[in-house]
Image (cartoon, rainbow, N blue to C red):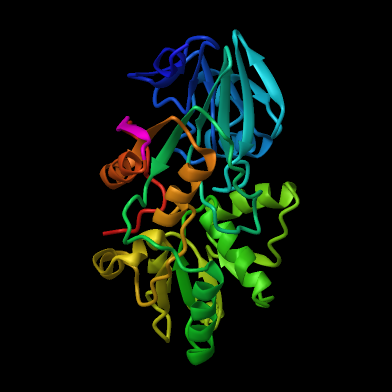
């Protein structure tokens, strides 16, 4: 059976007729298999949802207990039969609960990566390369200019600044699911044991991480705190919360943690005083390395900077095409 007959691109997203399900659909559908909890991939209103336990927990916190008519929990490496298709979830290394979707139909193997990264992350299982006939990948940072430094080096910059300016609070803008928890965990590994302040939305998601045995240490609510209390402290919150520090005696050191901080224009637009290059997406070398490791006959690209990756694939003898799915890629974007 041809790959295009197993997975087809519809107005609702990628559809597997053999199993009668969609992967990360962008509209309400009867049955959805969800890669991870970011809102551009996990939407409310489907009749049935299949995902990992952490992803289902994230969806419930964000959308309420009735986010779907029914839900099914899948464990990594558990083969689940849906119609004539066999579905297995594999770790994606993006955020807690993130999964690649391996679809097997009549001997053909297709993998939908969802969002992923190859860098170490203390808050979630590492990406697992899965050999396949067709690899459907993201390409958020699909340009050679994007080469993410080790997260520990960026965290060291933050702690160095805190040492230089002990009277100033340090406010880091970070996406509330995944990036915030990874940054907290990296700070703990670097030896920072003081309390960290987080906004209410981030705190709810941190509770999910704690419930799944990811220890984040002493966290305190940011809302309602006087600026004087936050002097010399680290706060992790969206840029909209920076206004809470308007009356501080000492101006806070503002920051934004994102892979987009690699480019000067993005860093100047929304990186604050201390831009941090920390990404939960694969960079150029990780993208190309992954494709070589899974060794697909075809490469499909869901979204992102696809042109360079398609050119690279063809040079390396791999058939490639863009899917250009609208509605993906909203996380990790700094303010303009």
Residue 226 visible in rendering: no
In the rendering, at what x and y percent does residue 138 appear?
Answer: 41, 41
Percent of width and height locating residue 195? 65, 72
Answer with left or right where residue 250 lies relative to residue 212.
Answer: left
Decide: is 68 above or below 155. Answer: above
Classify the position of the C terminus by image quarter. bottom left
Asked whether 238 or 137 is in front, the reply is: 137
Frontmost residue, 34 versus 249: 34
Of residues 215 and 168, the one drawn nearer to the viewer in this rendering: 215
Q: Which residues are magenta?
A: 317-324
Displayed quadrant of residue 130? top right
Q: How far across and down, in percent of the image, does residue 292 sit?
A: 48, 44
In this view of the protein, which residue sits in the foreground, 110 or 333? 110
- Snapshot quadrant of residue 181: bottom right
**Coordinates of residue 94 in the picture (x, y in percent):** 54, 48
Residue projecting furthest to the left: 265
Q: Is residue 283 magenta?
A: no
* Residue at 38 percent of width and 20 percent of height: 12
Residue at 36%, 60% (x, y): give it. 146
Residue appearing at x 66%, y 48% in the figure: 125
Quadrant hosting residue 136: top left
In the image, taking residue 110 as reference, residue 52 lies left or right, namely right
Q: Is residue 257 above or below residue 140?
A: below
């Amino acid at each position: 059976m041809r790959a295009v007959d197993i997975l087809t691109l519809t107005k609702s997203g990628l559809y597997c007729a053999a199993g009668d399900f969609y992967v990360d659909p962008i509209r309400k559908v009867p049955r959805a298999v969800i890669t991870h909890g970011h809102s551009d991939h996990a939407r409310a209103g489907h009749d049935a949802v299949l995902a990992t336990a952490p992803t289902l927990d994230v969806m419930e916190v964000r959308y309420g207990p009735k986010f779907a008519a029914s839900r099914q929990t899948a464990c990594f490496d558990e083969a689940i039969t849906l119609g004539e298709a066999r579905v297995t979830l594999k770790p994606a290394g993006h955020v807690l609960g993130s999964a690649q979707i391996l679809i097997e139909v009549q001997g053909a193997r297709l993998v939908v990566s969802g969002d992923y990264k190859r860098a170490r992350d203390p808050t979630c299982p590492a990406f697992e390369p899965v050999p396949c006939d067709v690899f459907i990948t993201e390409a958020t940072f699909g340009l050679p200019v994007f080469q993410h430094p080790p997260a520990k080096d960026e965290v060291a910059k933050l702690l160095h600044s805190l040492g230089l300016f002990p009277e100033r609070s340090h406010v880091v803008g970070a996406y509330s699911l995944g990036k915030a928890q990874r940054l907290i965990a990296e700070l703990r590994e670097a030896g920072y044991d003081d309390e960290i302040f987080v906004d209410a939305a981030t705190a709810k998601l941190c509770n999910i991480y704690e419930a799944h045995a990811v220890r984040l240490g002493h966290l305190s609510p940011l809302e309602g705190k006087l600026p004087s209390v936050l002097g010399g402290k680290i706060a992790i919150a969206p840029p909209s919360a920076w206004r809470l520090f308007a009356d501080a005696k000492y101006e806070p050191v503002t920051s934004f943690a994102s892979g987009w901080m690699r480019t000067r224009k993005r860093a100047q637009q929304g990186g604050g005083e201390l831009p941090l290059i920390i990404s939960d997406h694969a960079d150029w070398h990780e993208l190309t390395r992954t494709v070589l490791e899974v060794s697909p006959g075809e490469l499909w690209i869901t979204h992102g900077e696809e042109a360079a990756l398609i050119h690279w694939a063809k040079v390396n003898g791999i058939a490639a095409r863009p899917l250009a799915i609208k509605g993906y890629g909203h996380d990790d974007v700094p303010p303009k």
